[in-house]
Image: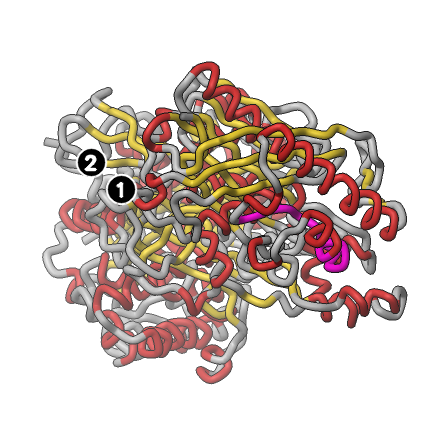
């Protein structure tokens, strides 16, 4: 029986660019920005890195295929660079590659990178990218990401018999809270608190989601250097050590897209990945034990549903938890999207998983200013959801201090 | 006995009031006021001659085994391809067999009846069943008379033999004349016509009576023997004089639908015939005449079997299912007569891979899925490994025809971000009746028409048009239904 990688891998250093519409930066600039910070934080030299993974999603407007782009920019010394592409989980997948590389004993020090340059498309939202085979490219609906995730709301409303107005009220709070948090974060894409009336009254993008229910489309890069806890302690004898407690991925089986049993109001992969992650991390009661979260709030309704899928809120109970402020920074519950989330920090797809870990890592080390600090966190959870509700990939990581 | 076994018609949902056209274009052509009466049927942005023919065919073949068809004929002057047989796309959408005869009839407005004659002769010579589906979506230039009177529709007739025949074929008479009243060159988008007085007086006024007399002489009948007379003629004055010349009582002459549909070209004679057959009684003699590059005149006699034919009210239903298109510019954009900016996102191209399409053509054209022989689960697109998590049987599938089954809305949205010339893009997950789900575009509806659990039917539509390569790609969409389907 596999025992998982709990406490077998430590994060030695991390870096993250300012996210946003980086008209000033190529993907290469973003990589250099994050890499410089990451290397400095880790306190090592470039030559100490033995292997690297790179997450990115949309080939067409980003770095293209493979891992070669990185060596053209960072000039890593003839080490393996493996590109991981798994939708919005691409960044966490690159982290998983690096962690498994270290946990297996293959490498002492490995680098996980994520980068996405989206704002060279010429329009808002994400470009189409073939994902479910070329047949579906030809016959699939004229769909966008907000339209696909918006359907969670229609199914959720039908399943729990909660009027759309009430759901809208809850998802308005979701976005309001993320804007509150994002406003305090100098690296966030959207740094403005928005009143609830403006959120609720914004133009509809895809029913029932309005403009403020949708996350930012951003450029950015984030990175982590990982090693064994032993090496970490040796290199940083006077610092707390953040270790990986769990790292899980789940991919849709086709049941959601084609079979009759899925209710449309939950994400099956999140539930499967969460169950495995809690087991790996030894978490019995996530609502009590998880100190803070960065979840995949590509759309506000996704965050609402995710609170139930992660077992933080009971099924059908997320609306109440949200409106009670349970996920607010100072709500006394489990603060969620403390850095602003995808909503406000931004969502350069391949970088997002690592950006979430960057926030959890720095919170665990209590590095942030008082006004956006989670007090004495023990475990931080990150969650990515790629694809669409009917066909997706979910990655979950849990990190915490080495005890 | 050989004759008509079933019939069907389809009128698209949108209607354009002719006065709206006059309001927009009257400044250019004040005389259009003469034509500014009634409304014309307008194909939705995702419909064309072929999709309307398919819709009519589906209506016509209700209750008939599509696999029993031996010939599938398509008639239109606005077929989507010069090379690529529309009849085969039609046959694919109808889930007909592959070992059938197929042909496109085109080039004139009498091509609908030419196809019908070919079907009658096919069945007479070979037995079996032949279906004719016609559709037309002709365009006149902005502010033209043709823009006023052309309408869009589809029509269909099933030809069979023996006891199922509801209207026995008694005989025909044809005139073939290179009388160039209307003309469209191989690369022309718009119709051009010669002087209307000439068309009215010489074209309709002489040729229709000539064809009727020819048929009557051949069958030893007189025009007054017919109980119902069907012939297209947009000119009200000409209709009166033709009726008078032939001694036809006005009440026996079918409404030419010009006030509600317009002239639907090659589809029109069969559309009018379908309307007539909805009300026809056993024993009645029907005269059907087409017009365009000559005339075909056909005689049918209604049999007792018409009483037993499952009611098919689709034509009346689609006539009643009308939504006003109160925006002339929208019509122009739908027809690509006015370039509209759908944003940079709208510049993204779809690339159709024909070898891939061929491997999946039954799933694409026919909405054929698979059904697991081990557990009975329907699934779409067809799977090799059963998607039922409790089953997982490998290669135990039989095919299942999903287009007729209808379904229910499982989830839905209305998307303003997706590039479309008819925003918002409405789509969602549909649960097929009998099991299985798929994601689909919705059409002929607004957000207000949708609710989880509401019934839908499936309609064959244009999925997208690749303007750069001039390729129309077809697939199925869901349309909210007023009642349970299947």
Q: Chain of mark 1?
A: B
Q: Which residue is mark 2?
A: B377
Q: Residue at 88% of width from left, 70% of height from top?
A: B27
**Image location of residue B59, percent across then percent down:** 42, 44
Q: Does A227 sit left or right of A139 as displayed?
A: left
Give SS at disc 2.
loop
Q: Chain of mark 2?
A: B
Residue depicted at x 83% and y 41%: B181
Question: x, y (%) of residue A77?
Answer: 54, 27
Q: Quadrant of residue A27?
A: top right
In this view, B223 is above or below A214? above
Q: Is residue A389 magenta?
A: no
Looking at the image, is A175 positioned above or below residue B265? below
Q: Does dot 1 land on a helix, a strand or a loop?
A: loop
Give coordinates of residue B91: x percent, y percent. 47, 28
Image: B466 above or below A50: below
Mark nearer the N terminus (1 vs 2):
2
**Does residue A365 appear in this view?**
no
Region rendered in magenta? B228-240
- Whether the residues at callouts 1 and 2 have beta carbons within 8 Å, the answer is yes
Along the line of sight, the residue nearer the viewer: A191 or B89: B89
- Classify 10 Å Cα crowding around label 1: few (below 14), some (14-19), many (20 and above): many
Q: Are marks 1 and 2 on the same chain?
A: yes
Q: CA distance from mark 1 to mark 2?
A: 7 Å
Q: Residue at x 64, y 55 (%)?
A: A123
Residue B453 in which image quadrant: bottom left
Residue B289: x %, y % from top left = 63, 40
Circle 2 packing at 10 Å, graded few (<14), some (14-19), many (20+), is many
Residue B436 marker: 1
Residue B239 sits inside the magenta stretch: yes
């Amino acid at each position: 029986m596999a025992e998982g990688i709990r406490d077998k891998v430590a994060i030695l250093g991390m870096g993250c660019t300012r996210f946003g519409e980086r008209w000033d930066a190529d993907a290469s600039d973003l990589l250099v920005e994050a890499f410089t910070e990451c290397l400095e934080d880790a306190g090592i030299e470039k030559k100490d890195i033995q292997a690297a993974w790179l997450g990115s999603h949309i080939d067409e407007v980003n770095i293209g295929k493979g891992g070669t782009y990185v060596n053209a920019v960072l000039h890593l010394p003839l080490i393996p660079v493996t590109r991981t592409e798994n939708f919005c989980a691409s960044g966490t997948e690159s982290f998983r590659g690096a962690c498994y590389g270290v946990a297996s004993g293959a490498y002492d020090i490995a680098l996980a990178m994520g980068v996405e340059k989206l704002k060279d498309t010429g329009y808002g939202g994400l470009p189409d990218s073939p994902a479910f085979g070329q047949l579906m490219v030809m016959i699939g609906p004229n769909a966008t990401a907000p339209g696909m995730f918006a359907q969670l709301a229609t199914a959720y409303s039908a399943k729990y018999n909660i009027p759309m107005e009430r759901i809208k009220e809850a998802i308005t709070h979701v976005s309001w809270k993320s804007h509150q948090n994002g406003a305090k974060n100098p690296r966030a894409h959207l740094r403005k608190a928005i009143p609830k009336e403006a959120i609720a009254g914004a133009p509809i993008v895809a029913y029932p989601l309005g403009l403020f229910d949708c996350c930012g489309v951003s450029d950015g890069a984030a990175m982590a250097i990982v090693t064994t806890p032993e090496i970490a302690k040796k290199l940083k004898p006077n610092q707390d050590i953040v270790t990986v407690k769990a790292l899980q991925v789940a991919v849709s089986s086709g049941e959601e897209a084609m079979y009759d049993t899925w209710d449309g109001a939950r994400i099956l992969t999140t539930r499967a990945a969460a169950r495995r992650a809690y087991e790996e991390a030894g978490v019995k009661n996530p609502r009590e034990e998880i100190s803070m979260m960065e979840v995949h709030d590509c759309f506000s309704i996704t965050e609402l549903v995710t609170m139930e899928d992660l077992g933080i809120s009971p099924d059908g109970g997320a609306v109440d938890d949200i409106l009670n402020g349970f996920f607010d920074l100072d709500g006394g519950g489990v603060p969620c999207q403390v850095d602003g989330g995808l909503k406000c920090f931004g969502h350069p797809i391949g970088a997002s998983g690592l950006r979430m870990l960057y926030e959890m890592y720095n919170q665990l080390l209590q590095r942030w200013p008082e006004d956006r600090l989670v007090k004495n966190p023990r475990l931080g959870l990150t969650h990515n959801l790629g694809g669409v509700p009917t066909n997706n990939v979910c990655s979950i990581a849990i990190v915490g201090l080495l005890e | 006995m050989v004759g008509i076994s079933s019939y069907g018609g389809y009128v698209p949902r949108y209607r354009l009031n002719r006065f709206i056209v006059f309001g927009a274009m009257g400044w250019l052509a004040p005389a259009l006021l003469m034509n500014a009466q009634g409304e014309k049927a307008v194909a939705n942005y995702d419909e064309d001659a072929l999709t309307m023919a398919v819709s009519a065919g589906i209506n016509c073949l209700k209750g008939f085994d599509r696999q029993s068809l031996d010939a599938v004929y398509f008639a239109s002057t606005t077929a989507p391809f010069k090379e690529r047989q529309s009849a085969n796309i039609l046959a694919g959408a109808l889930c007909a067999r592959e070992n059938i005869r197929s042909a496109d009839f085109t080039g004139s407005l009498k091509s609908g009846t030419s196809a019908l004659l070919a079907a009658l002769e096919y069945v007479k010579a070979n037995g079996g069943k032949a279906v004719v589906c016609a559709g037309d979506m002709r365009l006149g230039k902005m502010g033209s008379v043709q823009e006023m009177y052309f309408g869009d529709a589809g029509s269909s007739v099933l030809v069979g033999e023996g006891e199922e025949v509801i209207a026995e074929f008694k005989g025909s008479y044809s005139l073939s004349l290179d009388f160039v009243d209307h003309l469209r060159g191989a690369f022309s988008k718009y119709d051009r016509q010669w002087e209307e007085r000439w068309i009215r007086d010489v074209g309709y006024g002489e040729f229709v009576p000539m064809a009727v007399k020819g048929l009557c002489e051949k069958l030893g009948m007189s025009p007054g023997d017919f109980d119902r007379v069907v012939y297209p003629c947009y000119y009200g004055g000409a209709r009166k004089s033709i009726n008078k010349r032939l001694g036809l009582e006005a009440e026996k002459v079918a409404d030419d639908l010009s006030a509600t549909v317009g002239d639907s070209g090659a589809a029109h004679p069969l559309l009018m015939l379908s309307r007539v057959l909805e009300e026809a009684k056993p024993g009645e003699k029907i005269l059907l005449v087409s017009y365009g590059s000559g005339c075909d005149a056909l005689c049918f006699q209604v049999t007792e079997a018409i009483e037993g034919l499952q009611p098919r009210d689709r034509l009346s239903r689609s006539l009643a299912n009308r939504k006003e298109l109160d925006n002339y510019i929208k019509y122009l954009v739908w027809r690509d007569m006015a370039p509209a900016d759908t944003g940079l996102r709208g510049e993204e191209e779809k690339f159709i891979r024909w070898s891939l399409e061929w491997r999946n053509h039954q799933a694409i054209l026919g909405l054929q899925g698979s059904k697991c022989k081990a557990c009975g689960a329907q699934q779409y697109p067809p799977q090799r490994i059963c998607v039922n998590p409790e089953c997982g049987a490998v290669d135990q599938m039989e095919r299942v025809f999903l287009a007729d089954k209808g379904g229910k809305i499982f989830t839905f949205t209305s998307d303003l971000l997706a590039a479309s010339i008819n925003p918002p893009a409405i789509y969602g997950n549909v649960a097929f009746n009998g099991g299985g789900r798929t994601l689909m575009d919705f059409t002929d509806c607004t957000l207000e028409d949708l609710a989880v659990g509401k019934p839908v039917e499936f309609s064959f539509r244009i999925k997208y048009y690749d303007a750069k390569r001039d390729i129309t790609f077809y697939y199925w969409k869901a349309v909210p239904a007023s009642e349970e389907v299947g």
